[in-house]
Image: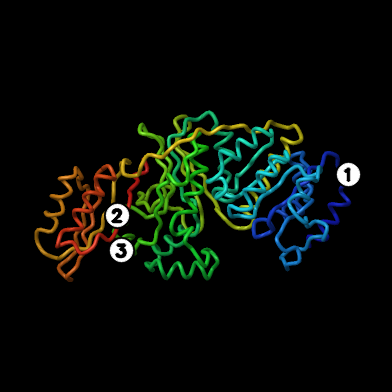
Amino acid sequence: MLAAISYSLRTADNMREGKIGVAILGLGTVGTGVAEILSQNRAMIFNRSGVDLELKKVLVRDPHKKREIELLPEVYAKNIEEILQDEEIGIVVELMGGLHPAKEYIVKALKAKKAVVTANKAVLANYAPELFQLARENNVPLYYEASVAGGIPLIQPLTESLVGNNINSVMGIINGTTNYILTKMSNEARSFTEVLKEAQELGYAEADPSADVDGLDAAHKLTVLVSLAFDTHIPLSDIYCEGIRTIDTMDIRFARDFGYGIKLLAIGKKTPSGIEARVHPTLIPLNHPLASVNDAFNAVFVNSQEVGELMFYGRGAGRYPTASAVVGDIVSAGRILNGIGTTLSRKFAKGRAVPIAETKGSFYVRLMVEDRPGVLGDIAYILGQNGVSVASVIQEGRAHDQVPLVFVTHEVKQGDLAKSIKNISELACVKEVANVIRVEKGE
């Protein structure tokens, strides 16, 4: 199919002036989608944007590998230098994934004064200040819309439409795999292990799902959101990160009894103490918009001083949703190269997140305790010693040796709660501290 399309692009060469050559690094799921959109929709893109984009080169590890699309042999570049030395190529699109050599190729492209578009949240999370500085020094754009929330237009609204807003917080579901798992666990009362296996069989989760279920993928993306929302780059190492492996169907049931659902949220907040940046399972009110975001969908809730509350919702991954965001960035870069607009030169201050122990919030706590009188009193005494008060409690029992004791606290410093939990775990009547989950009231 694309062989024929490549031929049609050749015949279009004599029809348009000011073409911009595009090179794609990596031809996986997203790269294939970008190649298809650029080729099939070239005339439509030109008509709508005034930018004529020509897919000139693709760099892959093995050009002879059988792929879903067919490209003319000359489209495959021998190496990155062939792309960098081609004066007709103005935009380099990095879709390789991983840190290396993706980061090095982005650096080389920027130094060669090529505009760069990337979907690589890992590279941005680790090297954003260096890369943005290089882009400024070489006066070329660096775009990254698809690095967070796939096909949802999010980066551009934050950098352009909301540029005059003071943003108070960003809070979102930005990992589709974990949202799919939690949705299935909630709706079908199935275990984490069972649903994870199904997600792997369906292709929602990798064979090694650690980056998703342990929260690291969401943490990478949160570094990008925090930098845009608060003009501050928080190192990945300073972001508190907790996954969903400990979530049990019992927690989901009790959360619902309290009026909450459970989601893995990435949260960035501007507070008097500094910036909070954290990823963790969260109880969120069932009437909050994020609570109704299900399956593999993503959503980001933005609260700003001027415009109030906004939510961006849609498919967070997949070939065409992500490719759509990448192509949007390519067009934006192309407009700048054609002199329509100016190169973005936003600067981010270096920052450090507020230590998690110093952050405040309400918490859901599930204990497994002996079924006898006085247990709740012993636990309440320890909580009171550390300044922790209980807002709601559920105690089941009179049937087994161990029974769940579940409560939700009023707002407390997380460090004080941690001291309480440590002391409570040492009580003879407490058999297990089964779970502690943050609660967001959605305010």
Q: Name the residue nearer the viewer: 90 or 45.
A: 90
Q: Label 1, on which residue?
A: 15
Residue 309's quadrant in the figure? top left
Quadrant into which the C terminus falls: top left
Q: Earlier in the sequence, mark 1 or mark 3?
A: 1
The amino acid pointed to by label 1 is: Met
Q: Is residue 15 left or right of residue 415?
A: right
Q: Residues within 10 Å of mark 3 (few under 14, many from 20)?
A: some
In the image, taking residue 195 as reference, residue 202 lies left or right, namely right
Q: Earlier in the sequence, mark 2 or mark 3?
A: 3
Look at the image and tell me in which quarter the N terminus lies. Answer: bottom right
Mark 2, residue position: 436
Q: Amino acid at mark 3?
A: Met
Between label 2 and label 3, give the one nearer the viewer.
Answer: 2
The crowd level at tag 1 (other Cα within 10 Å; few <14, some 14-19, many 20+) is few
Q: Is residue 62 left or right of residue 322?
A: right
Q: Which residue is the site of mark 3? A: 250
